[in-house]
């Protein structure tokens, strides 16, 4: 691997950006094009690095780029920003995902979508955050829940308790 591909940003390695347990298990290549790699750098620099620097605690990247084949295999949306390198799924380390989520909202970081993924007893399983340069970022905050096996996205309301 070339030195250019070792790090996407100061706190995100190339390996973290492309790793997938499903991809490894199923033998699916998950290699971004040079254009997508540039988008990944922009995403990491625009949303992950400001969060990580201000949070000053490790944050785990659990999903970043997904090839179209990998995205289909994991049941991702056909329009998933992961396929473009515009979205990251992250988890807090040494604190809760709910605390990390509220911190992101309070920091006023520009993002396209911020999604609390499948909260149980107020604690999201992970946080999805995306950023785009192809249009205005929506600053959309949602909560993903399962209803009869289907994922539904509900608007997040800051004055309401997280859905259990």
Image: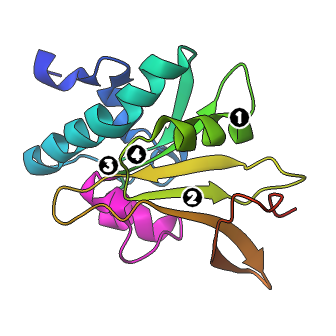
Task: Pick whichever of labels 4 and 2 is earlier in the sequence.
Answer: 4
Closer to us: mark 1 or mark 4? 1
Residue 64, label in figure: 4
Q: Which residue is mark 1?
A: 99
Alpha carbon separation for disc pair 3 and 4: 10 Å
Q: Are marks 2 and 1 in contact (CB under 8 Å)?
A: no
Tell me the quarter of the image containing the N terminus. top left
Closer to us: mark 3 or mark 1? 1
Magenta residues span 67-86
Q: Are marks 3 and 4 in contact (CB under 8 Å)?
A: no
Alpha carbon separation for disc pair 2 and 3: 23 Å
Q: Residues within 10 Å of mark 4 (few under 14, many from 20)?
A: many
Task: Determine if the magenta segment contains residue 71.
Answer: yes
Tell me the quarter of the image containing the C terminus. bottom right
Alpha carbon separation for disc pair 2 and 1: 14 Å
Q: Quadrant of residue 44?
A: top left
Task: Pick whichever of labels 1 and 4 is earlier in the sequence.
Answer: 4
Which structural element holds mark 4? loop
Which sits in the foreground, 148 or 133?
Answer: 133
Residue 137, label in figure: none
Image spot of residue 143 (x, y percent): 66, 65
Q: Which residue is mark 3?
A: 30
């Amino acid at each position: 691997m070339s030195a250019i591909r070792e790090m996407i940003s100061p706190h995100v390695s190339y390996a973290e950006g492309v790793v997938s347990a499903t991809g490894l298990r199923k033998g699916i290549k998950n290699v971004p094009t040079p254009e997508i790699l540039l988008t990944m750098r922009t995403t990491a620099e625009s949303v992950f690095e400001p969060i990580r620097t201000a949070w000053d605690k490790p944050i785990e990247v659990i999903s970043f780029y997904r090839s179209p084949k990998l995205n289909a295999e994991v049941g991702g949306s056909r329009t998933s920003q992961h396929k473009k390198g515009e979205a990251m799924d992250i988890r807090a380390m040494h604190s809760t995902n709910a605390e990390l989520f509220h911190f992101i909202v309070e920091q006023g970081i520009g993002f396209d979508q911020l999604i609390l993924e499948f909260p149980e007893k107020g604690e999201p399983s992970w946080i999805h955050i995306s950023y785009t340069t192809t249009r205005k970022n929506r600053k959309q905050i949602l909560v993903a829940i399962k209803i009869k096996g289907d994922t539904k996205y509900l608007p997040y309301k800051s004055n309401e308790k997280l859905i259990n």
